[in-house]
Amino acid sequence: MRRLDQLYKILTGLVMSFILIFSVNVPVYATEEDSPKDLSFNSVVEVESYSVEEGYIEAGKEATVNLTLHNANRNTAANSIFISVSSNSGMVYPSYGYDNQFYIGSLEADGSATVSIPVVVNSTFKSDYADFVCNIVYVSSGKQISNTSTMILPARGSNTIIVSAVDVSAHANLNSKSLLSISYYNKSSENVNDAILRIDGNLSDTTKAIDLDAVLGGKTYTKDCDIIFTQGGEQTISIVLEYTDINGDSIQQDLGTFKVTVDETSEATLTNNSGNVVLKTIGRIIAFLAFAAVIFSTIMYIKKR
């Protein structure tokens, strides 16, 4: 019995030693079924790009805003995507027959989709742009997530050249040069090469159109121009800036009307009058010298006799 007990202990020890030896540093490999199926974070759905189909929005007109949505996650899909649009300024809202919510559906990982949103612009809109807000709500990995993007929609009425000041002399002389000053700048990055001031009023033909030359993008200018009035008295002129903007549209920008008091005594008349006075004075001096010479000659003749 003692021998059997000893043999049993020896065998038990060998078995335990065998188990310990082969259980150390043995790697454990997970099967495909044991690995987690979702190895990524939640998807991020964003506005990848946007555009106004007509190129710009305009007061009182309809337009179409095209939004391209993108699932930025490369591993996980986004489901049950809804978007709602709005404008904080209240200048842009959905066209008649549409509400502000749109169902997109699902976007696979790294997928994109484009949605067209018909909008109408408030008739009182006068700005260079309008804000447009898109709120995105979707489900990813069983969680509801939201994301908001704010965009800027360009307006047709936005001016490329901004006129900061126009100054016209309140008094002028008939048929003489009078000063008109204008300060302006090009707010875009594109050059404007055909800017012209059109001036309506009783002016000489040569000063009714003033070329402003090239207006370079981002540059500020002050230009002094000459205008010549052809009628005297109380005169009114109106000034319009004309040019082709960066979209190829012809722009006519009203710069206002100005009243000028024109003195009918022109500089030319004053010059002529001054010239006549000088000629008369010279003539009188010559006549006096001639008369003096005659008197002197007469006196000398009498003395000789």
Image (tube, rainbow, N blue to C red):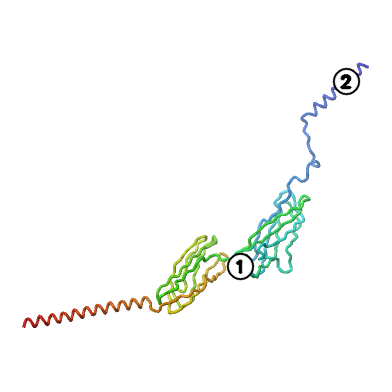
Q: Which circle marks residue 9 in the picture?
A: 2
Q: Is residue 38 above or below residue 11?
A: below
Residue 225: x and y, percent? 44, 69
Q: Residue at x 87, y 23 (%)?
A: 12
**Residue position for label 1:** 126
- What is the CA distance from the residue labelled 1 to the residue labelled 2? 99 Å
Q: Is residue 95 above or below residue 35?
A: below
Callout 2: few (<14), some (14-19), or many (20+) C-alpha neighbours within 10 Å?
Answer: few
Judge left or right: residue 138 versus residue 56.
right
Q: Quadrant of the C terminus?
A: bottom left
- Mark 1 near mark 2, Cβ–Cβ under 8 Å? no
In the image, which is nearer the foreground, mark 1 or mark 2?
1
Instruction: Spot the residue most to the left.
Output: 305
Location of residue 171 (image quadrant): bottom left
Callout 1: few (<14), some (14-19), or many (20+) C-alpha neighbours within 10 Å?
Answer: some
Q: Amino acid at mark 1?
A: Lys
Q: Amino acid at mark 2?
A: Lys
Q: Quadrant of the N terminus?
A: top right
